[in-house]
Image: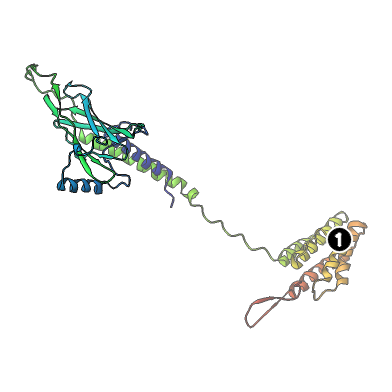
Amino acid sequence: MNIPKVAFLWLFSFCVCFLQLQAMGQDATSDAYNDSSIYSVDSFEDKNGNEDSIESEIETKREKEEQSIFALPAGIRPSVKSWVDRKKLKLGETLNFEVVVHRRVGHEVRLPSNVSFGKLDLLEKTMKNESQTKDGWTNDHYTFTLIALEAGAIQIPSIRFAVVTKGGDVFYMDTIPLEIAVADPSAGKVDPPIKDLAGVVKVYERNTPLLIFLGSLVLVFFVLVTVWYVARNWERWHPKAPKPAPPPRPPEEIAYEKLEALRAKLPLQLDLKKSWYLDLSFAIREYLSNRFDFDGLECTSEEIIDIMKTKKTVGITQAELWKFLFSCDMVKFAKHIPSDTEDREMIDEAFRIVDVTNQNYRVYDEEIGKGKNGIGAK
């Protein structure tokens, strides 16, 4: 069964309203910063995306031997610089903590995933790799956006970077701690005293029974509209199968009906003889066409005789059929005026043609009661 259009539209509108109300409770997210040279450093992975293996390798080497960066030769020793874009800010404001690592090309710099910034909270961190210099050195520029949620003198602690050489040795270097001052704009301000309430005044009171009643009315209305619409269009959505066409009438039944009507008109007046013979000829031609499966209404008498020669007929000869058709043509085309006796003989001959051809057209098997194509078949 197809879903009614009204019920479908009603359900669709309800779902849209529900999704809109749900979306209103979500905060809009900021657009991602799209730059091919800057990427997030939430997860500094190696080239194969195997972050855990690098971290475990670094931790293992740290346990065995914590080597300072100064253990490297001065010619390949990396350096680190750090600074903030502002040292004084107010509560709730942000600052950028910048770190630049100057290293040899081929060395890799790793930042621990659990970096602590003391009393400052991290909002965003990015890393930009600057172009390689001619002497084989390059810079990794880290930017940490921090927000101050506590007032007072706050220290950004040192951050330890791990440097992995081409040979797989791990060395460490630290940034220097930085001091910043966070001011509280509300410090020293006195809140005004709260006045006593003169009395509680009811501004709005929910009328629950009335809302339930109105909602029930709306629901009943929609149900009635839906039922009415479905009942109105049910027959159009589920049309009834057309009734089968009645079987065609037997050709002898049609012929007998027309010949009986022509016999009832006898005797004929002179001015009606021509039309009577036209109807008589038409009735026999139509019968022969339906019985022996050819278009006799568009054929001449000679053509009908030629066609009937190919058919198996019993009880009537080709000469007798030719005599009947020729007699009708004489009245139609030669203006012959037959007598009343001839009229009765012609109608009797027409009945005989139908009788003998109909009786011998099918042979019935008395034993099984099944009809077989017999005389009259091609």
Q: Where is residue 157 shown, x and y percent of the image?
A: 15, 31
Q: Nearer the viewer, residue 36 or 93?
A: 36
Q: Where is residue 162 shown, x and y percent of the image?
A: 22, 40
Q: Which structural element holds mark 1? A: loop
> Quadrant of the rendered structure where residue 336 is?
bottom right
Above or below, comparing residue 321 to residue 365 in the picture: above
Q: Would residue 4 appear left or right of 280 to someone viewing this image?
A: left
Mark 1 crowdedness (10 Å alpha carbons): few <14, some 14-19, many ≥20: few
Above or below, comparing residue 289 to residue 238 in the picture: below
Residue at 82% across, 66% down: 347
Q: Would residue 72 appear left or right of 197 to someone viewing this image?
A: right
Q: Nearer the viewer, residue 248 or 75?
A: 75
Identified by mark 1, the residue type is Thr
> Quadrant of the rendered structure where residue 377 is?
bottom right
The single residue placed furthest to the bottom in the displayed view is 367
Residue at 21% across, 48% down: 56
Q: Where is residue 191 shown, x and y percent of the image?
A: 8, 18
> Quadrant of the rendered structure where residue 34 is?
top left
Above or below, comparing residue 242 to residue 149 in the picture: below
User: Is any part of residue 150 visible from this angle?
Assistant: no
Above or below, comparing residue 361 to residue 173 in the picture: below
Q: Nearer the viewer, residue 146 or 168?
A: 168
Residue at 17% across, 41% down: 67
**Which residue is labeled 1 in the image?**
300
Q: Where is residue 305 shown, x and y percent of the image?
A: 85, 67
Looking at the figure, which quarter contains the C terminus?
bottom right
